[in-house]
Image: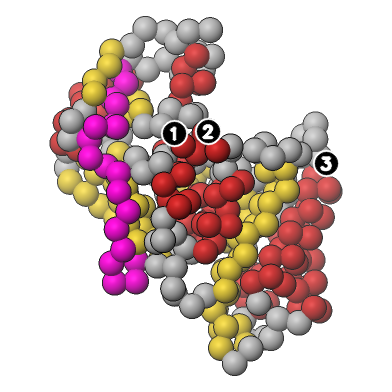
Amino acid sequence: MKPAPFRYVAARSLDEAVAALAEGGEDAKPLAGGQSLVPALNLRLLRPELLVDLNRAGLDGIAGEAGRVRVGATTRQAVLERSPHVHPLVREALPFVGHVVTRNRGTVGGSIAHADGAAELPLCLVALGGEVVAASTAGRRAFPAEELFVTHYTTTLRPGELLVETVWPAPGDGRHVAFEELALRAGDYALSMVAVVLRVDDAIVREARVAVGAVTARPTVLAEVGALLEGNAVTEEVAREAGALAATLVDPPGGIHASPAYLRHLTGVLVERAVRRAR
């Protein structure tokens, strides 16, 4: 199939991009890597009147600064994968993102803004306590990534706003991390995925963030599991308890590939594995 007719603007700067998006309103869509947008256009699931191409707008690049890493929205996922600035959690997760070919074109900002509940990069950004930066004709604003996601494919970005940057912790932040995912085949959407981030001192967990995706409509931090881990050494028993608790906290709808009971059990197993590895 072919997409419905649309106007096309190749923005040469951020100002030009946000101006075009503001002019187009709800009938305008930004185009970066196109790995999700183009198939939706071809299937006519989306029929925007205007596409604003961001690839010449200067929104790529990775820069480390004072314990943080800023990643431009149009930075390719494959570039981040090879970067010395990539956080260990993201390095673990990126091989699960699609395939090599899609990571060569797919962008970091595009994956975040697309807000797929089964996407790996949004889960990592939330688990690490990262931020997003959005821009519009009114200026820029930065806010925690956890406040971006509402549900599948829905964010809190305002009309005319464009996600221009994500902010991640630097790789040497001393935290222990692990990422676990199960899919039917390599590159498929995950049935369940888990990111664990621990700060450990004298073998005791001082801070814990356990986040899950695919079994939830958005990246979700399981605060109860974090509270269970904090103040304890991560023994085999504690890891099992964390997994068992996680299984009770998710309520996946299930589908043709797995029942809700299976997905709850799977999430518990993945949390247990990730906690063990992260310690």
- Residue 230 visible in the current orientation: yes
Please identify, in this view, whether the residue under mark 1 or under mark 3 is nearer the observer.
1
Tag 3: amino acid: Ser
Residue at image position (40%, 67%) is: 170
Disc 2: which residue: 101
Residue lying at 79% horizontally and 60% vertically, measured from the top left = 269
**x and y percent of residue 145 in the render?**
42, 55
Q: Position of residue 275 (x, y in %)?
A: 69, 70
* Local SS, label 1: helix
Instruction: Indicate yes or no whether the magenta region holds residue 43.
Output: no
User: Residue 105, labelled with which disc?
Assistant: 1
Q: Are marks 1 and 3 in contact (CB under 8 Å)?
A: no
**For residue 122, above or below residue 46:** below
- Let me know if residue 60 is in the magenta part: yes
Is there any visible trace of residue 152 in the rendered image? no
Q: Give residue 276's position: percent from left, percent from top.
A: 72, 72
Could you tell me if the residues under marks 1 and 2 are in contact, i.e. CB atoms within 8 Å? Answer: yes
In three-dimensional space, the C-alpha distance between marks 1 and 2, rounded to whole angstroms, equals 7 Å
Colour option used: secondary structure
Quarter of the rendering containing residue 249: bottom right
Quote the CA–CA distance across marks 1 and 3: 34 Å
Q: Label 3 belongs to which residue?
A: 259
Q: Residues within 10 Å of mark 1 (few under 14, many from 20)?
A: some
Furthest-bottom residue in view?
Answer: 202
Q: Quadrant of the C terminus?
A: bottom right
The residue segment tinted magenta is 50-68
Task: Look at 28% across and 13% down and name the residue there.
Answer: 7
Q: Position of residue 241 (x, y in %)?
A: 78, 73
